């Protein structure tokens, strides 16, 4: 395992997960619910920013590695999964939504691994619909974590609408990747 700046940032995201979850288990006498919401939101946004930043630094500094390529998406999925589980626990997201999003992440990760083994990983490379899904999800989750009125805007309703949009895009992107993988596997079997 190569320890460099990008990998250190990725490890920091993983270490942040128990702290992020733990905030909601602190006694209210230590931290009020609005403060818990704010800190959880800030931590999630910080994790999202470091996700972008570690990828940028890896490319910019020439510090890409096989371990980093493995660990980065794992850290992302763990953070999103932890946030969704907490949002279900807090009653802010329906369990079905969390199941769809987490289930898709597991399915597509496994699919990418399988496609890499058969030499067809390009067929399940990140697509525009996948990026759109990630954008909706990465806006919805911190909005739902914050869950307080902001400048008179209905934050909870906005977050709920965005997470539903993310779930629909999740299913759409999963269908897209499965269709591309099926076509690539068909070509592999012919060749």
Image: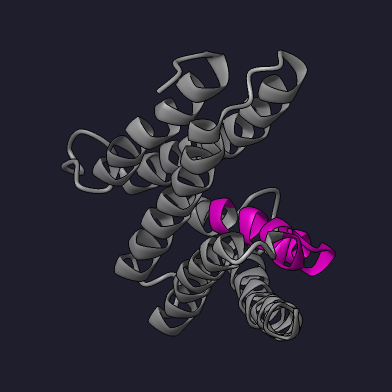
Extreme-right residue of the structure: 128
Vertical comparison of 163 with 140: above or below: below
- Image label count: 0
Q: Quadrant of residue 13?
A: top left
At which x and y percent is residue 131? 76, 59
Residue drawn where x is 27% and y is 48% of the image: 24
Q: Is residue 4 left or right of residue 20?
A: right
Image quadrant containing the C terminus? bottom right
Extreme-front residue of the structure: 191
Residue drawn where x is 70% and y is 77% of the image: 188
At which x and y percent is residue 146? 51, 50
Q: Is residue 98 left or right of residue 173?
A: left
Image quadrant containing the N terminus? top left
Vertical comparison of 39 with 185: above or below: above
Vertical comparison of 17 with 128: above or below: above
Residue drawn where x is 21% and y is 44% of the image: 28
Magenta segment main secondary structure: helix
Asked if the stretch drawn in magenta spans residue 126, the answer is yes
Residue drawn where x is 67% and y is 59% of the image: 134
Instruction: From the viewer's side, name the closer residue of 72 and 85.
Output: 72
At which x and y percent is residue 7? 50, 24
Q: How is the image coloured?
A: one colour
Asked if the stretch drawn in magenta spans residue 155, the answer is no
Q: Quadrant of residue 54?
A: top right
The magenta region covers 122-142
Instruction: From the viewer's side, name the closer residue of 125 and 185.
Output: 185
């Amino acid at each position: 395992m190569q320890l460099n700046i990008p990998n250190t940032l990725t490890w920091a995201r993983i270490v942040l997960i128990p702290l992020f979850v733990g905030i909601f288990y602190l006694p209210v006498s230590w931290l009020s619910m609005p403060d818990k919401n704010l800190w959880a939101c800030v931590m999630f946004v910080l994790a999202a920013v470091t996700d972008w930043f570690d990828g940028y630094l890896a490319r910019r500094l020439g510090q890409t590695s096989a371990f980093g390529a493995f660990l980065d998406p794992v850290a992302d999925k763990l953070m999103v999964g932890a946030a969704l589980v907490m949002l279900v626990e807090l009653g802010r997201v329906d369990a079905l939504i969390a199941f769809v999003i987490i289930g898709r992440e597991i399915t597509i990760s496994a699919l990418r691994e399988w496609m890499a083994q058969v030499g067809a990983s390009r067929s399940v490379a990140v697509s525009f619909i996948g990026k759109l899904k990630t954008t909706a999800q990465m806006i919805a989750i911190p909005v739902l974590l914050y869950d307080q009125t902001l400048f008179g805007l209905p934050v909870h309703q906005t977050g709920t609408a965005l997470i539903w949009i993310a779930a629909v895009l999740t299913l759409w992107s999963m269908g897209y990747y499965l269709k591309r993988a099926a076509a690539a596997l068909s070509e592999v079997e012919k060749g």
